[in-house]
Image (tube, rainbow, N blue to C red):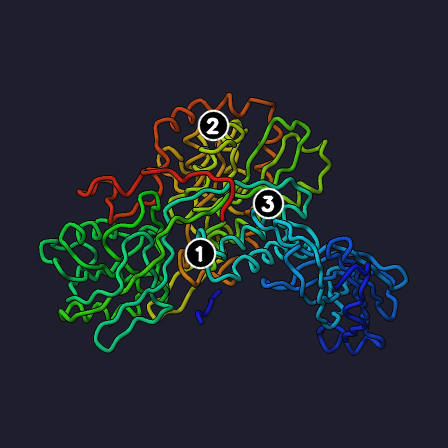
Amino acid sequence: MRLPIHLRGRARFAVVALACVAVAAPAAAARTAASANPPRISISVAAQVAAGARLVVKGRVTPAPARGSVLVQFRNVNGWRALGSTGLRQGRFEISRKLPPQLRSTQVRALFFEGERRRATSLARPVHVHVHAQPQPSPQPPVPPPAAPPLGDPLSEAVLMATVQRYSSLPNHLSGTPNSAAAQAEITSALAAAGMTIGQQAFTYPGFLPTQVSFTTGATSVPAAAIAPFLYSGTTPGVTAPLFYGNNGVFDKSKVAGKIVVASIAYQANARAVNLESGIEAAVEGGALGFVAVTQGVGDYPKWQDSNARTGTGPLPVVMVGKQSGKAVVKAAENGESGTLTLTADTTTACDRDVWGELEGADPSRRVFVGVPASSFTPSAAEHGAGVAILLGLARHYAAIPKSQRPVSLVFIAVGGHEIGWLGLQALLASSRASWFEAADAYVHLGSALGALTAGEEPNGEIVTSPVPPTSTALYNSENPLLVPAVGDIFAAAGVPTKVNEPFVVSGGEQTTAYAAGIPIASFSGSDLWFHTAGDLPATLSPRILAGDAEAFRRTVDLITALAPGLLRAENTLAAQHGSEIEAAKRAPTNPTLGSPGGTLGEHGVGGPAATPVAQCP
């Protein structure tokens, strides 16, 4: 297949919106013509303020259908949210729900479904609620109303992809930003809607929130869509200097003093930058004033780069530029022209959090964690949206099973601080929850590129894809006879065969923290063509592969939870020994401007102060 780029006073009730009627929802022309009486919805809305801004929505579907259900929604800054759903009695329905304490103006509408098919949608009407009451503090993190409940199998292609679409509707999910908080609030809301006990652990760390990023040379200015900052590299309000072409990142550092280095950076498996960190170190050592990495990624997307927040901001501003826009930058550097690089950022202390939902099992003393990173650079449909979809799909699946049939408690966790050093689990282990986590039966990690397909870019820019998982993904399972080769076999049987790597030899992601703590792990991570770019959108995923990965993880969780108490830990001796021999922080991304492993600047880019657990984010 080929994918182109391209209420006032003390009154108890006050009616605030009446009689909104809608025509049938859009459908195929033939189907509409076949219906002599298309359904219509009328609704009335009242606010019951004595009960704390509670909305009572009543309505009727005409003609009265023999079957069907109604979903009532209200709107907030993030779009339409579910107020509640109900069945019909002779075409009539009623729903009463509380609004969030901070929401006093909204819109309400109703949707009528027959099975999974939407048949009609009412018009939206404004609702204004005036309440004289003392304000109540909102929970931390803020939990919005739950998203519309998924229809059908929570692990089906359609439901999984709907979650991916929702997550990736944000342009980025950078740690410590409103977007990251919004994504985590969505996840928390969905877990709460599934009936789970919600928890969170906040943590602070050195911040780096870019405010201005640009590069110009002569009459050429790199488009905003083709440039990205290297977080924690360094800042400048604007430095103008001669350009020096540093080839592929290997150059004579004695020639770069007072210059801006430009280098063309290739990538292994679309993930690992070749010569980038060593090139940046050479630029720092040589006295360069800036560094422009022309990234050889897909199209003109700049490749974002994982970094390390632990020691704060380094001395050399670095930006990443897409390869097409980068051609003019390279030419200017080859000609010895000058350029101006700007990279400013808010470097005050930042705060992020881990959030989770716990589903109690028959033996509540035992826990299995299922985790996914919630923060990322871009829309991140494959990198993390797919993992979020599987996390919520599994949560809904197991929540529908009787407690007696769930041997252990399951904790579904979304961790923060991913792209800036995998801070979330380390913060959790440094918190009062440490023993809770360390005593876990296992940690199941839903990493990047789940649901990805094999893709490549032709010289003419055309994208050629194949509906099979890419070879740049892998399973990282503890060296434990109960996990290896069983988990690999499970993925193969689910139709998504995936290679298996030993985590002691190589492992990247939050699962490394769990592994180093001696917790048995079953994990997946990898990359695809659009990894760490703004092109990582839902259209790049294979719904079939995503559903296969979800099924494989369901079977993996079933395998782990069916084991006798203590058995998996008893068989984890070798993996626990290996885990004790590594330092997870030193496998996390580095900040090469502060020194990368083996660099002459020393290892200041890794390790450093850990993220600090706090009661809540401001």
In this view, which residue lies farthest toward the left? Answer: 254
Amino acid type shown at disc 3: Glu
Q: Residue at x 79, y 62 (%)?
A: 57
Which label is found at residue 480? 2
Q: Nearer the viewer, residue 611 or 510?
A: 611
Tell me which corner region of the image, top left, top right, bottom left or bottom right, holds residue 263.
bottom left
User: What residue did someone put label 1 on?
Assistant: 454
For mark 1, does the 10 Å Cα neighbourhood hold few (<14), some (14 to 19), or many (20 or more) residues? some
Which label is found at residue 210? none
Place of residue 160 in the rendered image (x, y in percent of width and height, measured from the top left) = 60, 54
Q: Nearer the viewer, residue 14 or 159?
A: 14
The answer to whether residue 69 of the structure is visible from this angle is: no
Q: Residue at x 38, y 44 (%)?
A: 421
For mark 2, does the 10 Å Cα neighbourhood hold few (<14), some (14 to 19), or many (20 or more) residues? many
Q: Going by the image, does 270 lie left or right of 469?
A: left
User: What residue did someone put label 3 on?
Assistant: 551
Place of residue 307 in the rendered image (x, y in percent of width and height, measured from the top left) = 34, 49
Q: Residue at x 50, y 36 (%)?
A: 522
Q: Going by the image, does 595 lie left or right of 363?
A: left
Q: Nearer the viewer, residue 160 or 29?
A: 160
Amino acid type shown at disc 2: Asn
Q: Going by the image, does 68 lie left or right of 192?
A: right
Query: Dot 1: what SS?
Result: strand
Query: Dot 2: what SS?
Result: loop
Amino acid type shown at disc 1: Thr
